[in-house]
Amino acid sequence: MDISYIINELGETREQYFNAIAPPIIQTSNFRVQRVDELKALFEDEHSGYLYSRGLNPTVEILRQKLAALDGAEETLVFNSGASAIFAGILANVKAGDHVVAVEKPYTWAQRMFDVILPRFGVTTTYIDGTRIEHFERAILPNTTLIYLESPNSWDYKLQPLKQVAELARSEGIVTMIDNSYCSPLYQRPIGFGIDLSMQTATKYIGGHSDTVGGVLSGTAAMMKKIFDSEFLNTGSGIQPFNAWLLIRGLRTLPTRLERISRSTQAVAAWIKAHPLVEGILFPFDESFPQYALARQQMQGACGLLSFYVRARAHDEIVTFCESLKHIMMAVSWGGHESLILPKCASLTAAEFDPNIKEHRMLRLYTGLEDPDYLIRDLEQAFQAAW
Ligand SMILES: *Cc1c(COP(=O)(O)O)cnc(C)c1O
């Protein structure tokens, strides 16, 4: 299916709503049912039609169809945050006594799930360096039911060999789930590699304007039906119609924004890499990246996020650098129109800062839609202010 078709037409039955180009926001909690036997069918299977917007809703339906097609999946559920999509995908695939193999340093709220919530139900997790398939082979136990991936990671961009991991998991009857937020389905399609569940936050690139929170989970029809009937309906964490509408709007410009961000990121990355106060950069499509070949093989693009190490000797040098930026803002999240910076040392006191630990000197930059020269000038003046 053409991406242009998916984004502009798929799922949009315009003749049903006055041929309006933009879809309606069907802001309703419930739907009228005209016959008792229809009601019976809906009670038996809420997935079979419109009953109540905690389940299915027509505006959300348009978004679901587009996202499923982009992921190359049979079905997609859209949640009111990436974190709730992570929660549902993991919870649906473990029971008391099971074991999870997860990549080390996954997204915060995936890690909290493994460290805080699952242990309360007797589910244990082994964290591994996911760069090599042998590490997965060694970590799998007889009671492993889930392998949790994040490729690339959103701070150090470590990748996992997705096809190999999917094949290994299939042969052992283990479900695989990935956080595909860094790439979005435009730049990486994990389901095509045999991964069972592909999750991404819609808050970042899909929304694209830093004005809504959402999450996407895609997989087979059977897997998604199981999640719909249980975790999705029971936690009531589906996306609301207005937020779904914002995400449909975001999708219209997704390819264009990613193209622009890819070009700008390359320009900014090249400038940062050449700066005398920078010790090195981490970016999957930079030739110095340790898994550059795998990145080129698995990903159609890399953009937006990159990290770099500054030659700082003290905490306050990094503080001054970040606080001197005039246009690039300090904030969590990424994927919007605005460029952002985050220093890794924000969680340290000045006394805890150790310049010999490279990670303490790491900053993460998100390149947004601004002119790259405008961003480079901002970085330059902040370097001058700090050093
Ligand atoms: C932001 C983010 C999430 C969580 O998404 P929310 O929509 O904020 O809940 C998950 N994974 C990664 C890599 C993220 O950056």
Image (tube, rainbow, N blue to C red):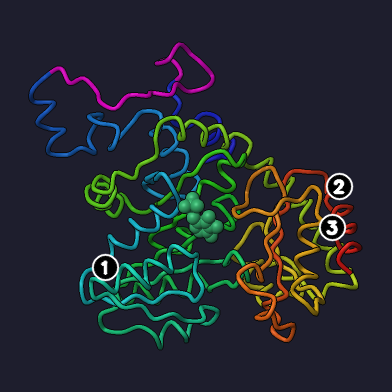
Question: Which portion, as a residue range, is magenta?
Answer: 14-34
Q: To which residue does mark 2 refer? A: 374
Q: Secondary structure at mark 1?
A: loop
Left or right, residue 242 beside residue 117: right
Disc 3 to disc 1, how far (Cα)? 46 Å
Query: Is 108 contained in the magenta span?
Result: no
Residue shown at 69%/76% (left/top)? 350
Q: Position of residue 103 (x, y in %)?
A: 47, 75
Amino acid type of the residue that numbered disc 3 sits on in the rendered structure: Leu
Magenta region, mostly helix, strand or loop? Answer: loop
* Ligand 1 contact, mark 2 (Cβ < 8 Å): no
Residue shown at 71%/81% (left/top)? 358
Disc 2 to disc 1, how far (Cα)? 48 Å
| Residue 189 in view in this figure | no
Return the disc, 3 or 1, that comes first in the chain's sequence: 1
| Residue 138 in view in this figure | yes
Residue shown at 27%/52% (left/top)? 231
Q: Position of residue 145 (x, y in %)?
A: 29, 73
- Where, by quadrant of the figure, is residue 28 drawn? top left
Q: To which residue does mark 3 refer? A: 379
Query: Is 15 contained in the magenta span?
Result: yes
Which mark is in front, 2 or 1? 2
Q: Position of residue 198 (x, y in %)?
A: 44, 57
Amino acid type of the residue that numbered disc 2 sits on in the rendered structure: Tyr
Residue 94, labelled with which disc? 1
Residue shown at 80%/80% (left/top)? 313
Left or right, residue 343 beside residue 55: right
Rendered position, 251 above or below 273: above
Which mark is in front, 3 or 1? 3
Q: Secondary structure at mark 3?
A: helix
Amino acid type of the residue that numbered disc 1 sits on in the rendered structure: Val
